[in-house]
Amino acid sequence: MNFNKRTHNCGELRINEAGQNVVLNGWANVARDLGNLIFIDLRDRWGITQIVIEPDSNPEAAKIGQQIRSEFVLSVSGIVRKRENPNDKIPTGLIEILISEIQILNQSELPPFHITGDSEVGEDLRLKYRFLDLRRQRLQNNMLVRSKLYQITHSYFYDNDFIEIETPVLMKSTPEGARDFLVPSRLHKGNFYALPQSPQIFKQILMVSGYERYMQIVKCFRDEDLRSDRQPEFTQIDVEMSFVNQDDIIELTEGFIKRIWKEILNVDITAPFQRLSYKDAMENYGSDKPDLRFDMKIKSINEIVANSEFKVFKDILESDGQIALINAKGCASYSRKQIDELTNFAKKYGAKGLAWIKLIDGEIKSPIAKFLTEKELKEISEIANLEEGDLLLISSDTWNKSLTILGALRLEIAKKQGILEKAKNNYSFLWVVDFPLFEKAEDSDEYYSMHHPFTSPKTDSLDMLEKDPYSANAIAHDLVINGHEVGGGSIRIHDKSIQEKMFKLLGLSDEEANEKFGFLLDALKYGAPPHGGIAFGLDRLVMILTGIDNIRDVIAFPKTTTGASLMEGSPSNVSESQLSELGLKLDLKKSADS
RNA sequence: GGAGCUUUAGCUCAGUUUGGUUAGAGCGCCAGUCUGUCACACUGGAGGCCGCGAGUUCGAGUCUCGUAAGCUCCGCCA
């Protein structure tokens, strides 16, 4: 097709260019036909420029102009001139283009939703017509931030002497953590590749190979249920270094985050970031990824009620549980119904109930007051800083559950009271360190790696690996921004015998360990350097940088909560011949029955 | 695996409490008028399987049951 190619984009012309002949290409954002004067807002990804057709002097252009509808693709030629009435809402608002020639390059059907403006549109419609949703300014801005982040990442790590190496997308299935996505092999019928949950082992092997500083922006895949911040395929900034300790990794990361915030948000942030041990994070905020933009700390009252006759408390204390509270400032006015809602909220996290204490008109109101002595009530009021109009929420359960419940309530209260809304332009950066090496399953006596099985124990925990392995700590570090876990890493095990011991503690026999991770154990035999690293969730970083609370809005082509793509219709059936080539037969009875 | 919310015009939603004539609004769309608009304005018009399937009822957008899709959360996510 012959058409006049643009001399400028739709966002760059200013009053200085007045008098110039220019050509613009783009989409008709909106057309306003005033009869003997036609205005068209021409849009491309750089901006909007108003073009004018004057029918009296250019009847041919007017004829075309009258046919133009929203989203038609145009090429326009004309002269830049000062506007009679400027529009101060857009950067090009001082000028307009008087048309000499206008060409319709393509028509458009009426789009199913407005491209212009920021109107709310149903998620399913947006995903089905993703090509139109991506045309909207909101998503274009998100993609732009994302692209900038790629560039900053590459340049920062390149400046720091890292090299980027690609690791396989088809690899061995090692279903230790999340479910793997599997890919059947045609050449090895009955065998499967897995898509990587992370390039963890490959990057460690690259350290053994002597690359010392590796990074990669890499897609990872986990076949687990989705959430508003979780997609089955997501992007990770993967980093690994040799001959380093934890502080080196943390320092490098802080420089990286500083550069991102400066270059994308023009915000200067100060390092080093605060550090909290896992234990302190849990005991103060009820979370291993606390949002520190507001305070509302959890207080333990175990000692205050140590001798309480109140059966609920007594039982919890006898089983080494945790009784703790938060002070919901100014929430004493909550109705019975609102408190019931909070209780139901807490029950989602496994709470059996929720006790509370209010101070209204100088008087304490509480369903459990009659079980507490005056001294206990006084000490609780003191430790909680109970003031007029406050509501204390008290949870008693196992250590982990009680604190997790209060941590969730802490966030819920902050949301309800507008505390989060007020803090939305603030940023809190935090390292959570000293994670336990192991985590016990709730319903069995089995232990799992809290991080992954290649995480190094702290050196002072090496002894404990022998005596009390399940109390040992890991040299692990999570980067938490505004209550989101955006990065996690550790110093890895580079000693083969410790790695073997870890597998054993996780219940893997020598055979199983060799079957699954033999190649890693092999590599550790040949001069593995001390090494460690970190990986960042790129999608979550973009969410924070754009202030968007949904991961789908920072990914060009995301999946729905059932893992489907509404645009191209995946996942989909495949033909019999495709299956037989792979030596596969479907047996859907089971899933149809259940 | 479990819980909750939503589904009505092209889009965003009201209507469901208490079943009852012809299901509404705003925006958009179509036609016409209009020389300074920028969410143009004005006049007129078209547009509905009330997600889908059963059931209750003289009668269902409205009540009951089932089902699908989207979203949010718990479990899950080494």
Image: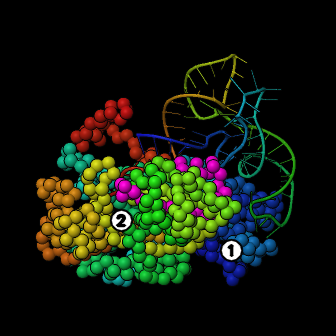
Q: Quadrant of residue B40?
A: bottom right
Label 2 vs label 1, nearer the camera:
2
Chain letter for mark 1: A
Quadrant containing the N terminus of chain A is bottom right
Mark 2 surroundings within 10 Å by alpha-carbon count, few (fewer than 14), some (14 through 19), many (20 or more) = some
The span from disc 2 to disc 1 (Cα, nearest Å) is 39 Å
Residue flagged by tag 2: what amino acid is it?
Val
User: Is residue A329 on the magenta stretch?
Assistant: yes
In this rendering, the answer to whether A150 lies above or below B76 is below
Whichever of labels 2 and 1 marks the residue nearer the N terminus, that label is 1
Q: Which residues are magenta?
A: A317-344
Specify how the rendered protein is coloured: rainbow
Give the residue pinned by disc 2.
Answer: A218
Q: Position of residue B44 (x, y in %)?
A: 84, 42
| Quarter of the image where one finds residue A508 | bottom left
- Residue A308 or residue A74, whichever sits in front: A308
Going 54% across and 50% down the picture, which residue do you hit?
A343
Q: Secondary structure at mark 1?
A: loop
The residue lying toward the viewer, choosing from A255 and A84, is: A255
Q: Which class describes the residues within 10 Å of circle 1: few (<14), some (14-19), or many (20+)?
A: many
Q: At 53% from the left edge and 48% from the top edge, which residue is drawn?
A: A344
Between A382 and A200, the residue placed more toward the observer is A382
State left or right for residue A60 relative to residue A590: right
Q: Is residue A481 left or right of residue A211?
A: right
Q: How many numbered marks does the figure carry? A: 2
Residue corresponding to mark 1: A92
Instruction: Measuring from the top left, give residue A41's x and y in whole percent.
Output: 69, 64
**Residue at image location 45% in from the left, 82% down from the top:** A271
Q: Secondary structure at mark 2?
A: strand
The residue located at (74%, 67%) in the rendering is A52
